[in-house]
Image (spheres, helix red, strand yellow):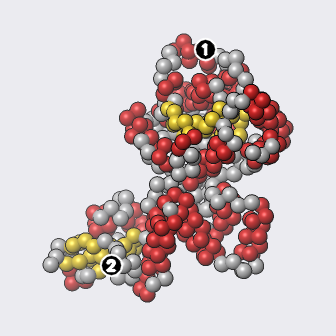
Amino acid sequence: MPTIDEQVDILMSGAEYGDPQTRETMRRELRERLAEAEKVGRPLRVYCGFDPRTADLHLGHTIPMRKLRQFQEFGHDVTFLIGSFTSLIGDPSDKDTARNQLTREQVMENANTYAEQAFKILDPNLTRVRYNDEWLSTLDFADIIRLASNFTVQQFLVRENFKKRLDGGQPIYLHELFYGLMQGYDAVAQETDVQVGGQDQLFNILVAGRKLQEGMGQRPQVAIIMGESLPGTDGDIKMSKSLGNHIPIMAEPQNMFGKVMSLPDKVLPIYHKLILGWSPVQLKEFEEGLKSARLHPNEEKMRLAREIVAIFHGADAAQSAQKHWDEVFRSHGGLPEDMPEEVLTADEKVVDVLRRLNMVASGGEAKRLIQQNGVRLNEQPVTDPQASVTLDMLPAVLQVGKRKFVRLIAKS
Protein backbone atom coordinates (compact mmCIF):
# COMPACT_ATOMS: atom_id res chain seq x y z
CA MET A 1 0.00 0.00 0.00
CA PRO A 2 1.39 3.46 -0.87
CA THR A 3 2.21 5.83 1.99
CA ILE A 4 -0.31 8.52 2.92
CA ASP A 5 1.72 11.17 1.11
CA GLU A 6 1.85 8.99 -2.00
CA GLN A 7 -1.92 8.45 -1.79
CA VAL A 8 -2.48 12.21 -1.51
CA ASP A 9 -0.35 12.81 -4.60
CA ILE A 10 -2.33 10.26 -6.60
CA LEU A 11 -5.77 11.32 -5.37
CA MET A 12 -5.07 15.02 -5.90
CA SER A 13 -3.63 14.50 -9.38
CA GLY A 14 -5.78 16.25 -11.97
CA ALA A 15 -7.61 18.33 -9.34
CA GLU A 16 -7.91 22.07 -9.96
CA TYR A 17 -9.68 24.83 -8.03
CA GLY A 18 -8.63 28.04 -9.76
CA ASP A 19 -6.98 29.12 -6.53
CA PRO A 20 -3.67 27.78 -5.11
CA GLN A 21 -4.76 28.39 -1.51
CA THR A 22 -7.94 26.34 -1.93
CA ARG A 23 -5.95 23.53 -3.50
CA GLU A 24 -3.52 23.53 -0.61
CA THR A 25 -6.41 23.53 1.90
CA MET A 26 -8.05 20.54 0.18
CA ARG A 27 -4.72 18.73 0.02
CA ARG A 28 -4.08 19.28 3.72
CA GLU A 29 -7.60 18.22 4.71
CA LEU A 30 -7.38 15.09 2.56
CA ARG A 31 -4.10 14.13 4.19
CA GLU A 32 -5.65 14.62 7.64
CA ARG A 33 -8.64 12.45 6.73
CA LEU A 34 -6.44 9.69 5.31
CA ALA A 35 -4.23 9.69 8.41
CA GLU A 36 -7.27 9.49 10.70
CA ALA A 37 -8.83 6.75 8.57
CA GLU A 38 -5.67 4.69 8.80
CA LYS A 39 -5.44 5.24 12.57
CA VAL A 40 -9.03 4.23 13.40
CA GLY A 41 -9.44 1.67 10.62
CA ARG A 42 -12.45 3.36 9.01
CA PRO A 43 -12.40 3.92 5.24
CA LEU A 44 -13.34 7.35 3.92
CA ARG A 45 -16.87 7.80 2.56
CA VAL A 46 -16.43 9.02 -1.01
CA TYR A 47 -19.03 9.72 -3.67
CA CYS A 48 -19.77 11.31 -7.00
CA GLY A 49 -23.27 12.02 -8.32
CA PHE A 50 -24.59 11.48 -11.84
CA ASP A 51 -27.94 12.90 -12.93
CA PRO A 52 -29.89 10.67 -15.36
CA ARG A 53 -31.17 13.49 -17.55
CA THR A 54 -30.68 11.10 -20.48
CA ALA A 55 -30.08 7.35 -20.68
CA ASP A 56 -26.43 7.62 -21.68
CA LEU A 57 -23.31 8.18 -19.65
CA HIS A 58 -20.41 9.21 -21.88
CA LEU A 59 -16.63 9.20 -21.92
CA GLY A 60 -16.50 12.54 -20.10
CA HIS A 61 -18.25 10.94 -17.12
CA THR A 62 -15.50 8.35 -16.83
CA ILE A 63 -13.00 10.98 -15.63
CA PRO A 64 -14.54 11.37 -12.13
CA MET A 65 -15.31 7.63 -12.18
CA ARG A 66 -11.59 6.88 -12.57
CA LYS A 67 -10.92 9.06 -9.54
CA LEU A 68 -13.50 7.02 -7.60
CA ARG A 69 -11.72 3.89 -8.77
CA GLN A 70 -8.46 5.20 -7.27
CA PHE A 71 -10.22 5.62 -3.92
CA GLN A 72 -11.54 2.05 -4.23
CA GLU A 73 -8.04 0.73 -4.88
CA PHE A 74 -6.90 2.39 -1.64
CA GLY A 75 -9.69 0.61 0.25
CA HIS A 76 -12.23 3.41 0.70
CA ASP A 77 -16.03 3.26 0.70
CA VAL A 78 -17.22 4.52 -2.71
CA THR A 79 -20.78 5.44 -3.61
CA PHE A 80 -22.00 5.92 -7.17
CA LEU A 81 -24.93 8.25 -6.53
CA ILE A 82 -27.74 8.43 -9.08
CA GLY A 83 -29.47 11.80 -8.94
CA SER A 84 -32.98 10.44 -9.17
CA PHE A 85 -34.35 13.52 -7.37
CA THR A 86 -31.93 16.26 -8.45
CA SER A 87 -32.62 15.27 -12.08
CA LEU A 88 -36.18 16.47 -11.67
CA ILE A 89 -34.73 20.01 -11.65
CA GLY A 90 -31.50 19.57 -13.57
CA ASP A 91 -28.20 21.19 -12.70
CA PRO A 92 -28.10 24.84 -13.85
CA SER A 93 -24.35 25.15 -13.19
CA ASP A 94 -23.15 25.47 -16.79
CA LYS A 95 -26.42 26.50 -18.45
CA ASP A 96 -27.50 29.90 -19.72
CA THR A 97 -31.19 28.95 -19.70
CA ALA A 98 -33.38 26.87 -17.40
CA ARG A 99 -33.52 23.15 -18.15
CA ASN A 100 -36.74 21.38 -18.99
CA GLN A 101 -38.12 19.55 -15.98
CA LEU A 102 -38.42 15.79 -16.23
CA THR A 103 -41.00 13.49 -14.67
CA ARG A 104 -39.94 10.85 -12.15
CA GLU A 105 -40.90 8.17 -14.69
CA GLN A 106 -38.54 9.67 -17.28
CA VAL A 107 -35.72 9.92 -14.76
CA MET A 108 -36.04 6.33 -13.54
CA GLU A 109 -36.21 5.02 -17.11
CA ASN A 110 -33.01 6.90 -17.93
CA ALA A 111 -31.35 5.61 -14.74
CA ASN A 112 -32.15 2.00 -15.53
CA THR A 113 -28.68 1.14 -16.89
CA TYR A 114 -26.54 3.72 -15.05
CA ALA A 115 -25.03 1.23 -12.62
CA GLU A 116 -24.25 -1.22 -15.44
CA GLN A 117 -22.50 1.58 -17.33
CA ALA A 118 -20.58 2.69 -14.23
CA PHE A 119 -19.26 -0.82 -13.69
CA LYS A 120 -17.29 -0.48 -16.92
CA ILE A 121 -14.91 1.59 -14.74
CA LEU A 122 -15.81 0.90 -11.09
CA ASP A 123 -15.44 -2.42 -9.27
CA PRO A 124 -19.01 -3.72 -8.88
CA ASN A 125 -18.04 -5.60 -5.73
CA LEU A 126 -16.72 -2.44 -4.07
CA THR A 127 -19.32 0.08 -5.26
CA ARG A 128 -22.34 1.23 -3.31
CA VAL A 129 -25.14 2.40 -5.64
CA ARG A 130 -27.69 4.81 -4.14
CA TYR A 131 -30.47 7.09 -5.38
CA ASN A 132 -30.86 10.53 -3.81
CA ASP A 133 -34.67 10.46 -3.78
CA GLU A 134 -34.07 8.15 -0.79
CA TRP A 135 -33.57 11.25 1.39
CA LEU A 136 -34.54 14.27 -0.72
CA SER A 137 -38.09 13.08 -1.39
CA THR A 138 -38.74 12.82 2.37
CA LEU A 139 -37.97 16.47 3.17
CA ASP A 140 -40.96 18.64 4.02
CA PHE A 141 -41.33 22.40 3.57
CA ALA A 142 -40.06 23.12 7.09
CA ASP A 143 -36.92 21.09 6.28
CA ILE A 144 -36.35 23.12 3.10
CA ILE A 145 -36.67 26.41 4.99
CA ARG A 146 -34.23 25.25 7.62
CA LEU A 147 -31.70 24.15 5.01
CA ALA A 148 -32.12 27.32 2.93
CA SER A 149 -31.41 29.50 5.96
CA ASN A 150 -27.73 28.51 5.66
CA PHE A 151 -27.34 30.50 2.43
CA THR A 152 -27.93 33.97 1.04
CA VAL A 153 -29.41 34.74 -2.37
CA GLN A 154 -26.23 36.68 -3.16
CA GLN A 155 -24.13 33.53 -2.82
CA PHE A 156 -26.04 31.98 -5.68
CA LEU A 157 -26.43 35.06 -7.88
CA VAL A 158 -22.70 35.78 -8.05
CA ARG A 159 -22.19 32.47 -9.86
CA GLU A 160 -21.09 33.16 -13.42
CA ASN A 161 -24.01 31.54 -15.22
CA PHE A 162 -26.64 33.22 -13.01
CA LYS A 163 -24.84 36.58 -13.15
CA LYS A 164 -24.74 36.40 -16.94
CA ARG A 165 -28.47 35.71 -17.12
CA LEU A 166 -29.22 38.45 -14.59
CA ASP A 167 -27.15 41.01 -16.49
CA GLY A 168 -28.78 39.97 -19.76
CA GLY A 169 -32.33 40.23 -18.41
CA GLN A 170 -32.83 36.47 -18.73
CA PRO A 171 -35.07 34.74 -16.17
CA ILE A 172 -33.62 32.83 -13.21
CA TYR A 173 -36.27 30.57 -11.75
CA LEU A 174 -36.47 30.05 -8.01
CA HIS A 175 -36.36 26.27 -8.30
CA GLU A 176 -32.93 26.51 -9.98
CA LEU A 177 -31.46 27.88 -6.75
CA PHE A 178 -32.58 24.72 -4.98
CA TYR A 179 -30.23 22.50 -6.99
CA GLY A 180 -27.09 23.46 -5.06
CA LEU A 181 -29.06 23.10 -1.83
CA MET A 182 -30.17 19.61 -2.82
CA GLN A 183 -26.68 18.50 -3.80
CA GLY A 184 -25.35 19.93 -0.56
CA TYR A 185 -27.88 17.81 1.31
CA ASP A 186 -26.63 14.71 -0.53
CA ALA A 187 -23.34 15.22 1.32
CA VAL A 188 -25.17 15.69 4.64
CA ALA A 189 -27.36 12.60 4.19
CA GLN A 190 -24.36 10.41 3.43
CA GLU A 191 -22.04 12.07 5.99
CA THR A 192 -19.53 12.33 3.17
CA ASP A 193 -15.79 12.66 3.72
CA VAL A 194 -14.92 13.32 0.07
CA GLN A 195 -16.93 14.34 -2.98
CA VAL A 196 -15.58 14.12 -6.52
CA GLY A 197 -16.87 16.27 -9.38
CA GLY A 198 -16.05 18.40 -12.41
CA GLN A 199 -15.36 22.11 -12.73
CA ASP A 200 -19.06 22.84 -13.23
CA GLN A 201 -19.65 21.42 -9.73
CA LEU A 202 -17.19 23.73 -7.95
CA PHE A 203 -19.90 25.78 -6.23
CA ASN A 204 -22.17 22.83 -5.45
CA ILE A 205 -19.39 20.83 -3.80
CA LEU A 206 -16.98 23.37 -2.38
CA VAL A 207 -19.53 25.94 -1.19
CA ALA A 208 -22.99 24.40 -0.87
CA GLY A 209 -21.92 20.95 0.29
CA ARG A 210 -19.28 22.05 2.78
CA LYS A 211 -21.34 24.94 4.20
CA LEU A 212 -24.44 22.82 4.66
CA GLN A 213 -22.47 20.07 6.39
CA GLU A 214 -21.02 22.64 8.77
CA GLY A 215 -24.49 24.07 9.39
CA MET A 216 -25.76 20.58 10.21
CA GLY A 217 -22.93 19.91 12.67
CA GLN A 218 -20.80 17.76 10.37
CA ARG A 219 -17.20 18.08 9.36
CA PRO A 220 -17.09 19.61 5.85
CA GLN A 221 -16.14 17.25 3.06
CA VAL A 222 -12.95 17.37 1.00
CA ALA A 223 -13.68 18.49 -2.56
CA ILE A 224 -11.82 16.77 -5.39
CA ILE A 225 -12.60 18.96 -8.42
CA MET A 226 -11.30 17.53 -11.67
CA GLY A 227 -9.47 20.25 -13.56
CA GLU A 228 -9.76 19.31 -17.22
CA SER A 229 -12.89 18.52 -19.19
CA LEU A 230 -12.97 16.11 -22.10
CA PRO A 231 -13.74 17.87 -25.39
CA GLY A 232 -16.56 16.44 -27.45
CA THR A 233 -16.37 15.13 -31.00
CA ASP A 234 -16.29 18.72 -32.28
CA GLY A 235 -12.92 19.11 -30.55
CA ASP A 236 -13.76 22.43 -28.90
CA ILE A 237 -16.73 22.26 -26.53
CA LYS A 238 -16.91 20.09 -23.39
CA MET A 239 -18.48 16.72 -24.12
CA SER A 240 -22.18 17.00 -23.39
CA LYS A 241 -25.25 14.86 -23.94
CA SER A 242 -27.39 17.95 -24.50
CA LEU A 243 -25.05 19.22 -27.24
CA GLY A 244 -24.88 15.86 -28.99
CA ASN A 245 -21.07 15.89 -29.18
CA HIS A 246 -20.67 12.93 -26.82
CA ILE A 247 -19.42 9.36 -27.15
CA PRO A 248 -21.75 7.15 -25.08
CA ILE A 249 -20.21 4.45 -22.89
CA MET A 250 -22.80 2.01 -24.22
CA ALA A 251 -22.37 2.93 -27.89
CA GLU A 252 -22.03 -0.10 -30.15
CA PRO A 253 -18.36 -0.95 -30.82
CA GLN A 254 -18.47 0.10 -34.49
CA ASN A 255 -20.20 3.36 -33.61
CA MET A 256 -17.79 4.09 -30.75
CA PHE A 257 -14.79 3.35 -32.98
CA GLY A 258 -16.15 5.65 -35.69
CA LYS A 259 -16.83 8.48 -33.26
CA VAL A 260 -13.27 8.32 -31.94
CA MET A 261 -11.95 8.33 -35.51
CA SER A 262 -13.99 11.50 -36.18
CA LEU A 263 -12.11 13.42 -33.46
CA PRO A 264 -9.90 16.31 -34.61
CA ASP A 265 -6.19 15.53 -34.37
CA LYS A 266 -5.64 18.33 -31.86
CA VAL A 267 -7.50 16.48 -29.07
CA LEU A 268 -5.42 13.30 -29.24
CA PRO A 269 -3.13 14.27 -26.32
CA ILE A 270 -5.95 15.11 -23.90
CA TYR A 271 -7.82 11.89 -24.77
CA HIS A 272 -4.68 9.89 -24.02
CA LYS A 273 -4.29 11.78 -20.76
CA LEU A 274 -7.88 11.69 -19.48
CA ILE A 275 -9.18 8.42 -20.92
CA LEU A 276 -6.05 6.25 -21.05
CA GLY A 277 -4.36 7.84 -18.04
CA TRP A 278 -1.03 8.53 -19.71
CA SER A 279 1.72 10.11 -17.61
CA PRO A 280 3.30 13.51 -18.38
CA VAL A 281 6.40 11.71 -19.69
CA GLN A 282 4.34 9.57 -22.07
CA LEU A 283 2.36 12.60 -23.26
CA LYS A 284 5.49 14.64 -23.91
CA GLU A 285 6.99 11.87 -26.02
CA PHE A 286 3.66 11.44 -27.84
CA GLU A 287 3.32 15.14 -28.66
CA GLU A 288 6.92 15.32 -29.83
CA GLY A 289 6.29 12.30 -32.06
CA LEU A 290 3.27 13.96 -33.65
CA LYS A 291 5.14 17.24 -34.13
CA SER A 292 8.11 15.57 -35.80
CA ALA A 293 5.85 13.37 -37.99
CA ARG A 294 7.41 10.25 -36.46
CA LEU A 295 3.87 9.37 -35.42
CA HIS A 296 0.98 9.62 -37.90
CA PRO A 297 -2.17 11.19 -36.37
CA ASN A 298 -4.55 8.85 -38.18
CA GLU A 299 -2.68 5.71 -37.10
CA GLU A 300 -2.49 6.98 -33.52
CA LYS A 301 -6.20 7.80 -33.59
CA MET A 302 -6.92 4.28 -34.81
CA ARG A 303 -4.90 2.81 -31.95
CA LEU A 304 -6.74 5.10 -29.51
CA ALA A 305 -10.09 3.96 -30.94
CA ARG A 306 -9.09 0.29 -30.47
CA GLU A 307 -8.04 0.88 -26.88
CA ILE A 308 -11.21 2.79 -25.97
CA VAL A 309 -13.49 0.18 -27.56
CA ALA A 310 -11.53 -2.56 -25.76
CA ILE A 311 -12.07 -0.83 -22.39
CA PHE A 312 -15.85 -0.89 -22.75
CA HIS A 313 -16.48 -3.88 -25.04
CA GLY A 314 -13.39 -6.10 -24.92
CA ALA A 315 -10.49 -6.84 -27.26
CA ASP A 316 -12.51 -8.98 -29.70
CA ALA A 317 -15.06 -6.21 -30.22
CA ALA A 318 -12.25 -3.72 -30.77
CA GLN A 319 -10.72 -5.91 -33.47
CA SER A 320 -14.12 -6.36 -35.12
CA ALA A 321 -14.74 -2.60 -35.08
CA GLN A 322 -11.28 -2.04 -36.60
CA LYS A 323 -12.10 -4.56 -39.35
CA HIS A 324 -15.38 -2.83 -40.13
CA TRP A 325 -13.61 0.52 -40.31
CA ASP A 326 -11.01 -0.90 -42.68
CA GLU A 327 -13.74 -2.33 -44.91
CA VAL A 328 -15.48 1.01 -45.11
CA PHE A 329 -12.49 3.31 -45.51
CA ARG A 330 -9.59 1.19 -46.73
CA SER A 331 -11.10 -1.49 -48.95
CA HIS A 332 -11.69 -0.98 -52.65
CA GLY A 333 -14.82 1.05 -53.20
CA GLY A 334 -14.89 2.04 -49.55
CA LEU A 335 -18.14 0.13 -48.90
CA PRO A 336 -18.82 -2.25 -46.00
CA GLU A 337 -19.60 -5.84 -46.89
CA ASP A 338 -22.33 -6.21 -44.27
CA MET A 339 -24.50 -3.15 -44.95
CA PRO A 340 -28.26 -3.59 -44.43
CA GLU A 341 -30.57 -4.01 -47.43
CA GLU A 342 -33.97 -2.40 -47.99
CA VAL A 343 -36.50 -3.14 -50.71
CA LEU A 344 -37.72 -0.20 -52.79
CA THR A 345 -41.11 -0.82 -54.42
CA ALA A 346 -41.53 2.53 -56.20
CA ASP A 347 -39.60 5.66 -57.11
CA GLU A 348 -39.00 7.68 -53.93
CA LYS A 349 -37.34 10.95 -53.02
CA VAL A 350 -33.95 10.57 -51.35
CA VAL A 351 -35.11 12.75 -48.45
CA ASP A 352 -38.10 10.48 -47.87
CA VAL A 353 -35.95 7.33 -47.97
CA LEU A 354 -33.57 8.81 -45.39
CA ARG A 355 -36.45 9.70 -43.07
CA ARG A 356 -38.23 6.38 -43.51
CA LEU A 357 -35.09 4.40 -42.69
CA ASN A 358 -34.22 6.65 -39.71
CA MET A 359 -30.89 7.59 -41.27
CA VAL A 360 -31.67 11.21 -40.33
CA ALA A 361 -33.71 12.73 -37.52
CA SER A 362 -35.85 14.94 -39.77
CA GLY A 363 -36.43 16.12 -43.32
CA GLY A 364 -34.68 19.35 -42.40
CA GLU A 365 -31.54 17.45 -41.37
CA ALA A 366 -31.65 15.48 -44.63
CA LYS A 367 -31.81 18.66 -46.72
CA ARG A 368 -29.01 20.25 -44.69
CA LEU A 369 -26.79 17.19 -45.21
CA ILE A 370 -27.50 17.27 -48.94
CA GLN A 371 -26.49 20.93 -49.08
CA GLN A 372 -23.26 20.00 -47.27
CA ASN A 373 -22.51 17.09 -49.67
CA GLY A 374 -23.10 14.66 -46.82
CA VAL A 375 -25.39 12.30 -48.79
CA ARG A 376 -24.15 10.04 -51.58
CA LEU A 377 -25.98 7.75 -54.01
CA ASN A 378 -23.79 5.13 -55.67
CA GLU A 379 -20.78 7.06 -54.36
CA GLN A 380 -21.85 10.28 -56.08
CA PRO A 381 -22.94 13.33 -54.03
CA VAL A 382 -26.66 14.07 -54.00
CA THR A 383 -26.91 17.82 -54.61
CA ASP A 384 -30.64 18.31 -55.21
CA PRO A 385 -33.01 18.02 -52.19
CA GLN A 386 -35.72 16.97 -54.67
CA ALA A 387 -33.64 14.11 -56.10
CA SER A 388 -35.23 10.67 -56.25
CA VAL A 389 -34.10 7.06 -56.27
CA THR A 390 -35.81 5.38 -59.22
CA LEU A 391 -36.39 1.67 -59.73
CA ASP A 392 -34.18 1.61 -62.81
CA MET A 393 -31.21 2.69 -60.59
CA LEU A 394 -31.43 -0.43 -58.43
CA PRO A 395 -29.47 -1.92 -56.86
CA ALA A 396 -28.09 1.30 -55.37
CA VAL A 397 -26.08 2.24 -52.29
CA LEU A 398 -27.26 5.23 -50.26
CA GLN A 399 -24.75 6.71 -47.82
CA VAL A 400 -25.12 9.37 -45.10
CA GLY A 401 -21.94 10.82 -43.64
CA LYS A 402 -19.07 8.41 -43.12
CA ARG A 403 -20.75 5.54 -41.33
CA LYS A 404 -24.36 5.05 -42.45
CA PHE A 405 -25.01 2.83 -45.48
CA VAL A 406 -27.96 1.00 -46.96
CA ARG A 407 -28.23 -1.06 -50.16
CA LEU A 408 -31.53 -0.40 -51.91
CA ILE A 409 -32.77 -3.35 -53.95
CA ALA A 410 -35.79 -4.13 -56.11
CA LYS A 411 -38.55 -6.47 -54.98
CA SER A 412 -37.74 -9.98 -56.18
Graded by Cα atoms within 10 Å as few (under 14), some (14 to 19) or many (20 or more), the crowding at tag 2 reads some
Badge 2 element: strand
**Which residue is farthest bottom?**
332
Residue type at mark 2 is: Val
Residue 7 placed where, x, y %? 77, 44
Quarter assignment of residue 95 = top right
Q: CA distance from mark 1 to mark 2?
A: 65 Å
Is 267 placed above or below 229 here?
Answer: below
Quarter assignment of residue 187 = top right
Q: Quadrant of the N terminus?
A: top right
Badge 1 element: helix
Residue type at mark 1 is: Arg
Q: Which mark is residue 397?
A: 2
Q: Nearer the viewer, residue 55 or 158?
A: 55
Q: Which mark is residue 146?
A: 1
Q: Residue at x 78, y 67 (%)?
A: 284
